[in-house]
Image: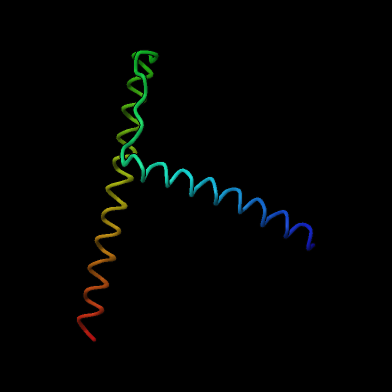
Amino acid sequence: MILLLNICIKILRIILNKMAEDYLEFEKNKKIKTLNLDDFSIDELYNYIKELKNEIERVKKEIFKKNKSNIDAEKYFKKY
């Protein structure tokens, strides 16, 4: 059991280190890496547009959620 826990901890550390590296790389550049679109077919480009639209919607939802959290926090602190 302890061996299994140690293995899980090591795996989690590897995953967290990778996530931290990815985050730091993004923070360093503060921009999304672009793809070479020359290699895409027309259908693939349309699919890429769909994926980007889905990502935009995901980001909008996250912004909404964070704004709501900020508003809720402001309401909470105004009470006290």
- Looking at the image, which is closer to me, 7 or 52? 7
Q: Residue at x 34, y 18 (%)?
A: 37
Q: Residue at x 32, y 33 (%)?
A: 52
The vertical placement of 61 against 30, above or below, is: below
Q: Position of residue 75 (x, y in %)?
A: 22, 76
Q: Residue at x 55, y 52 (%)?
A: 16
Q: Position of residue 38 (x, y in %)?
A: 35, 13
Q: Position of residue 67 (x, y in %)?
A: 24, 60
Q: Is residue 64 left or right of residue 1?
A: left
The vertical placement of 70 against 57, above or below, is: below
The vertical placement of 60 against 50, above or below, is: below
Q: Count up the numbered dots.
A: 0
- Looking at the image, which is closer to me, 67 or 37? 37
Report which quarter residue 77 is drawn in.
bottom left
Q: Is residue 20 left or right of residue 37?
A: right
Give the farthest residue toward the left. 78
Q: Position of residue 27 (x, y in %)?
A: 36, 46
Give the farthest residue toward the front. 28
What colouring method underlies this structural image? rainbow
Image quarter in which the C terminus is found: bottom left
Report which quarter residue 36 is drawn in.
top left
- Looking at the image, which is closer to me, 19 or 68? 19
Q: Residue at x 22, y 73 (%)?
A: 74
Image quarter in which the N terminus is found: bottom right
